[in-house]
Structures are given as structure tokens and as C-alpha cells.
């Protein structure tokens, strides 16, 4: 359902700017490439954590399409930065447990096994993005926080978190969105498994047209492509579930 080839105009020549959390980074990159192959215009992606995205928009950041979890999207709509009526659901992503290549895989198949692995770990890391906020709350809820707080580290986003984690050398455990961990698999990260079902948390992601897009027609074209079956297949392949 992407836009077909047509005569370019000065308006259409401007790239569509997408502001998104990094949890759907690899999915959006692949979708942009597919959109381009189908004759769609240029799309530029910018990634930030959802809380930081909100601050950027408050400070005057411009975008044509905004991707975020629904709760943050509702705030962005309330700010007058996105249109509630032109919004689609992309899917949801769960939280995963990661180790480095070469590390023994910890047993994370049950909540009890995960708790044992965390107590035995040398260092625990997570982001301060949506998945990391949930993990921080989960560690408290499981009654582990007082015992593991001295060895737990949190970082702004996946880039900082995963880079730090790759530099560790002990029996370490990290948390992140499953699509993000998969995206770093060629850089030395390994998905040990998703959080056990009884404590799993899925973050949903929606895409909306900005209130005042600079390239409204091309932005709507890309939004329609995002809602189509080809984009859906790409999202699923990258770990974003329907």
C-alpha cells in the first residue's frame, strides 16, 4: 500500500521526518528501504527514548510522523504535536534478557530461575527507556532490589546500555527490548530469552501524523505503508508482535 511513483514536486521533495523510540529501530530501517523500493519518497529516521522524545517536541523539535507508546502518544496529542485521528498501531515488543557472546546462558525460563541468575550475576544493566523503567519496577516488586542495587546500572538508552554491557567481563545480565537485543546480535549480544510469561511486559507502539507536518502528502503515504501488510511482515520479523 505504499505510494507509487509519481512526478516529484518541491513539496514532495522534502524528506519525511520520523521521530521514534529505538525499540523499533531495525524494523523502521527495513520498512523505509521497502518503501523506497516501491517508489516512495525519502524518509529520515531519528531515534530517542520516549520520555526524551516528549521533551524534544516540547522544545520545538519538528517531525512529520511520531512513533511512541500509547501513553506517551496521548501526552503528545494533548500537547498539540500529533493528530489522534490519524494514528495506527504498529505492534508490541516484549522485554528480553541478554548476555554477551561466549557467556554461559543463564536459565531465565521461570521467574524463580531468573531471580537466582540475578543474585549470582556480577553486574545487571538496563535502560531508562520504556523497557528499563518496567525492569526497575520489577526488581523492586520481586523483592530483589536491596540485594542487587549495588551491582545494578541503568543508562539513558539502548546505545549506552548495550555499549557498556559489551565492555563488561564478568557473569553479567542485561535487559532490553527484544527487537533491540536482536539488532545488536552482530555486535556481540545474545538473547538469553524473554522474561518469563508471568512477569513479561509488552510495550505497544503507535505511529501518528504530526499536527503540522512539513510534508503532509508524503507523510500520509508513508503512514499508509506502515499500516500495510509488507510493513507488518517486517515488524514481525524484527520481533514486534501484532
Image (cartoon, helix red, strand yellow):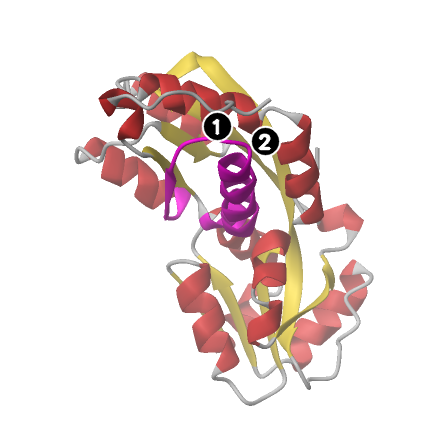
State the separation of the CA atoms marked 1 and 2. Answer: 7 Å
Q: Determine crowd level at label 2: few under 14, some 14-19, many 20+ residues with C-alpha closer than 10 A.
A: many
Q: Secondary structure beneath disc 2?
A: strand
Q: Looking at the image, is 66 positioned above or below residue 56?
A: above
Q: Is residue 1 visible?
A: yes
Mark 1–mark 2 contact, CB under 8 Å? yes
Q: Give the magenta range.
A: 22-50
- The answer to whether residue 62 is left or right of residue 84 is left
Residue picked out by circle 1: 207
Residue picked out by circle 2: 90
Q: Position of residue 145 (x, y in %)?
A: 55, 65
- The answer to whether residue 104 is left or right of residue 210 is right
Q: Position of residue 74 (x, y in %)?
A: 42, 22
Among the two numbered marks 1 and 2 on one chain, the one whose residue lies closer to the N terminus: 2
Residue plotted at (77% across, 59% down): 111
**Outermost residue, left direction?**
59
- Pick the front one: 110 or 63: 63
The picture quadrant where one finds residue 75 is: top left
Q: Is residue 141 visible?
A: no
**Outermost residue, front direction?**
7
Amino acid at each position: 500500500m505504499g505510494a507509487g511513483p509519481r512526478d516529484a514536486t518541491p513539496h514532495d521533495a522534502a524528506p519525511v521526518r520520523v521521530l521514534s523510540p529505538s525499540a523499533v529501530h531495525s524494523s523502521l530501517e527495513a520498512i523505509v528501504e521497502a518503501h523506497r523500493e516501491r517508489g516512495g519518497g525519502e524518509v529520515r529516521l531519528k531515534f530517542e527514548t520516549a520520555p526524551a522524545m516528549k521533551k524534544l517536541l516540547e522544545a520545538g523539535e519538528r517531525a512529520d510522523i511520531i512513533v511512541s507508546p500509547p501513553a506517551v502518544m496521548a501526552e503528545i496529542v494533548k500537547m498539540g504535536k500529533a493528530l489522534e485521528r490519524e494514528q495506527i498501531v504498529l505492534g508490541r515488543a516484549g522485554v528480553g534478557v541478554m548476555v554477551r557472546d561466549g557467556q554461559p546462558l543463564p536459565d531465565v525460563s521461570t521467574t524463580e530461575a531468573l531471580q537466582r541468575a540475578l543474585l549470582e550475576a556480577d553486574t545487571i544493566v538496563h535502560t531508562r527507556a520504556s523497557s528499563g523503567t518496567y525492569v526497575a519496577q520489577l526488581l523492586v516488586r520481586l523483592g530483589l532490589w536491596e540485594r542487587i542495587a549495588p551491582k545494578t546500572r541503568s543508562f539513558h538508552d539502548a546505545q549506552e546500555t548495550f555499549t557498556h554491557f559489551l565492555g563488561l567481563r564478568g557473569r553479567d545480565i542485561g535487559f532490553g527490548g527484544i527487537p533491540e537485543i536482536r539488532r545488536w546480535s552482530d555486535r556481540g549480544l545474545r538473547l538469553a530469552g524473554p522474561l518469563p510469561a508471568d512477569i513479561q511486559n509488552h510495550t505497544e507502539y503507535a505511529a501518528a501524523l504530526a499536527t503540522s507536518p512539513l510534508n503532509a502528502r508524503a507523510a500520509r503515504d508513508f503512514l499508509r505503508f506502515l499500516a500495510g501488510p509488507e510493513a507488518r511482515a517486517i515488524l514481525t520479523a524484527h520481533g514486534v508482535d501484532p
